[in-house]
Image (cartoon, grey):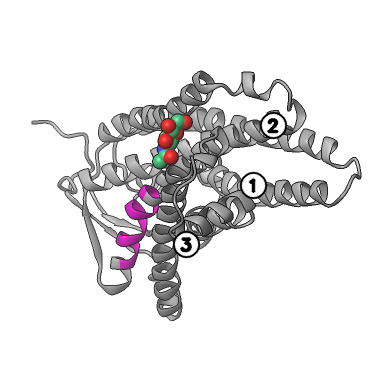
């Protein structure tokens, strides 16, 4: 059997190096990540339970929110346990396992890009077109958008992973990240041609990261224009909500952009890991806080649920 390799045999296992170059941070990162993981799981489970059990929250906005929570639970569970393992021992992962991890993780990140844009659009319709909102965001629309959000990520990343699985790895097998990611595999470790995979990923990232982010910026800036009209505290509050959404969403998109659209522009060893931490951890912490804890409706529903009052119809 002919192999397009540089001589040595094909790699079957990868080793994730994680933050091996900063051992003094291990204890800190280990505790922070454990706390983030625990709170992500409990916080988001709470959100899903509250939304599903409160009829008052059966509205597109809260369906989107609960779906975002499901995505975050899956997303955290794909990445964080392997990261934690890396602090305790060398985290080895099979080549297939590595591609599966990237597939699930990448798909969910792409899903989130889409869903965050949908959520911004939903708020835009509710604020700027309040009268037409019930028609513009009827069941057919929000179900369709939700389905598209889930499917788009898995289709886009499915295609990328199929291309990645054609690539040969003939060693070394150390991945200088804390999870399996596109650029260290394709730019660093591959020993066959990765041009097609790189071109495809670049194009898809531009479409699926930049376009949703552009939509988010446009919708929030239009909300901003409407909300700037000074009329009382509720507008100020709505404005501050929108701007905090914007900060979280920008961190998420900007770090994804840096990692997938211009990976070769980053020359530092540490910076990609910091970006990766940003878009995993920071969004995991801030999404529930920003979208939920500052939302009176959700808090009230949570209170009703915890006080064991009969669930309202
Ligand atoms: C996700 O969204 C769909 C439709 O938008 C909704 O029916 C479903 O209940 C949501 N999932 C959760 C866990 O809330």
| Magenta stretch, residue numbers | 74-84
The residue that label 3 is drawn on is 307
- In the image, residue 229 sits, relative to residue 302, either above or below, namely above
The residue that label 2 is drawn on is 126
Instruction: Give the crowd class for mark 2: few <14, some 14-19, many >=20 residues within 10 Å.
Output: some
- In the image, residue 37 sits, relative to residue 116, either above or below, namely below
**Secondary structure predominantly adopted by residues drawn in magenta:** helix
| Quadrant location, the N terminus | top left
Across and down, in percent, residue 110 comes to 46, 37
Q: Does the magenta stretch include residue 81?
A: yes
Disc 2 versus disc 1: nearer the observer: 2
Q: Which residue occupies 25% across, 71% down?
A: 89
Across and down, in percent, residue 300 comes to 58, 54
Please give the label number shown on residue 250: 1
Q: How far apart are marks 2 and 1 (CA)?
A: 21 Å
Disc 1 versus disc 3: nearer the observer: 3
- In the image, residue 50 sits, relative to residue 2, either above or below, namely below
Q: Which residue occupies 24% across, 51% down?
A: 171
Instruction: Give the crowd class for mark 1: few <14, some 14-19, many >=20 residues within 10 Å.
Output: some
- Left or right of residue 42, residue 260 in this image: right
Q: Distance between the residues labelled 3 and 2?
A: 31 Å
Sequence order check: which comes first, mark 1 or mark 3? 1
Tag 2–tag 1 contact (CB < 8 Å): no
Looking at the rendering, which quadrant does residue 60 occupy? top right
Sequence order check: which comes first, mark 3 or mark 2? 2
Disc 3 versus disc 2: nearer the observer: 3
Across and down, in percent, residue 201 comes to 45, 32
Ligand 1 is in which quadrant of the figure? top left
Q: Which residue occupies 37% across, 64% down?
A: 18
Residue at far left of view: 1
Please give the label number shown on residue 211: none
Q: How far apart are marks 1 and 3 (CA)?
A: 37 Å
């Amino acid at each position: 059997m002919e192999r397009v390799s540089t001589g040595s045999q094909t790699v079957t296992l990868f080793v994730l190096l994680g933050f091996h170059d900063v051992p003094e941070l291990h204890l800190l990162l280990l505790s922070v990540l454990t706390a983030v993981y625990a709170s992500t799981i409990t916080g988001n489970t709470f959100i899903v339970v509250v939304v599903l059990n409160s009829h008052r929250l059966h509205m597109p906005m809260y369906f989107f929110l609960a779906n975002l929570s499901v995505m975050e639970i899956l997303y955290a569970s794909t990445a964080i346990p392997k990261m934690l393992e890396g602090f305790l021992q060398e985290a080895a992962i099979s080549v297939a396992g590595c591609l599966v991890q990237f597939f699930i993780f990448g798909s969910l990140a792409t899903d989130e890009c889409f869903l965050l844009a949908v959520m911004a659009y939903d708020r835009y319709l509710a604020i700027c077109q309040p009268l037409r909102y019930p028609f513009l965001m009827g069941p057919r629309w929000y179900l369709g958008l939700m389905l598209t959000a889930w499917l788009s990520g898995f289709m886009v990343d499915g295609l990328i992973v199929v291309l990645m699985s054609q690539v040969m790895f003939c060693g070394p097998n150390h991945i200088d990240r804390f999870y399996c990611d596109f650029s260290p595999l394709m730019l660093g470790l591959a020993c066959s041609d990765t041009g097609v995979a790189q071109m495809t990923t670049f194009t898809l990232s531009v479409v699926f990261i930049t376009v949703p982010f552009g939509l988010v910026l446009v919708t929030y800036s239009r909300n901003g224009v409407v909300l700037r009209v000074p009329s009382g505290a509720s507008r100020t509050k709505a404005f501050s909500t929108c701007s905090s959404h914007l900060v979280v969403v920008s961190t998420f998109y900007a770090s994804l952009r840096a990692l997938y659209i211009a990976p070769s522009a980053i020359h530092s060893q540490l910076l990609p890991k910091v970006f990766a931490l940003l878009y995993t951890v920071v969004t995991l912490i801030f999404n529930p806080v920003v979208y939920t804890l500052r939302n009176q409706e959700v808090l009230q529903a949570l209170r009703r649920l915890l006080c064991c009052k009969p669930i309202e119809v």
